[in-house]
């Protein structure tokens, strides 16, 4: 089984790539924003919804892994606790540490994506201000970094090659 962690700021292309990659691997894609949006709709405050979403997200992922399925974790992975939970899950699944970081270096394109997308309640409609990103982490593991200004088919091909390379080495 594989546990692939996506990483990147909102609008960087994580979810788009994760959905296509999930069909190709195959793997179940778990989107943290779907869980958080449901909690927000119930009237749960932002701070509690964020923590509750991550608890649910990782418990759900662990349940899916225990059933024998690979998972793709679709979240920004900005906090040390999130990285630690991903590492624990990958260890339980006997998966190599697989992280795909999505970056969109063109600020105008990032803004266009955020404004144009069909956003959930938990998703920003404009780039996050620097103070919201303060305290976020740079992951401590090796990872594949993809510039999502490139065509999606090329990104999927690179991501699949990365996953297959490390998955094959772990067998």
Image (cartoon, helix red, strand yellow):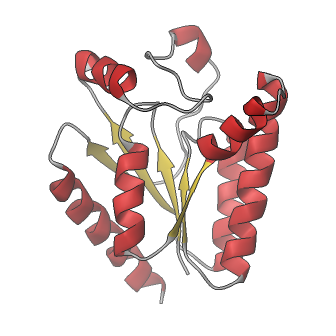
Picture coordinates of residue 71 (x, y %)?
56, 68
Q: Where 161 sits versus 59, above or below?
A: below
Front one among 58 and 166: 58
Q: Residue at x 62, y 80 (%)?
A: 94
Q: 125 and 57: which one is in front?
A: 125
Q: Residue at x 55, y 75 (%)?
A: 70
Residue at 52%, 22% (x, y): give it: 124
Residue extending farthest to the bottom is 171
- Left or right of 106 in this view: 24: right
Apparent side of residue 100 relative to residue 155 in the rendered image (left or right): right
Q: Quadrant of residue 18?
A: bottom left
Tell me if residue 149 can be seen: yes
Residue in the foreground of this view, choosing between 92 and 121 = 121
Q: Is residue 43 left or right of residue 153?
A: right
Image quarter hosting the N terminus: bottom right
Residue 143 appears in the rendering:
no
């Amino acid at each position: 089984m594989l546990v692939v962690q996506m990483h990147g700021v909102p609008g960087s292309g994580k979810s788009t790539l994760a959905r296509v990659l999930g069909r190709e691997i195959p793997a179940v894609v778990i989107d943290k924003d779907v869980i958080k949006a449901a909690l927000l709709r119930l009237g749960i405050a932002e701070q509690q919804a964020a923590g509750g979403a991550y608890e649910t997200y990782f418990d759900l992922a662990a349940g899916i892994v225990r059933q024998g399925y690979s998972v793709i974790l679709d979240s920004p992975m900005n906090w040390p606790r999130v990285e630690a939970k991903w590492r624990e899950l990958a260890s339980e699944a006997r998966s190599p540490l697989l992280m795909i970081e999505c970056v969109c270096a063109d600020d105008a394109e990032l803004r266009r994506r955020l404004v144009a997308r069909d956003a959930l309640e938990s998703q920003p409609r404009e780039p996050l201000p620097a103070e919201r990103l303060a305290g976020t982490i740079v992951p401590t593991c090796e990872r594949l970094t993809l510039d999502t200004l490139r065509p999606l088919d090329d990104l999927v091909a690179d991501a699949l090659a990365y996953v297959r390379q490390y998955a094959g080495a772990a067998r």
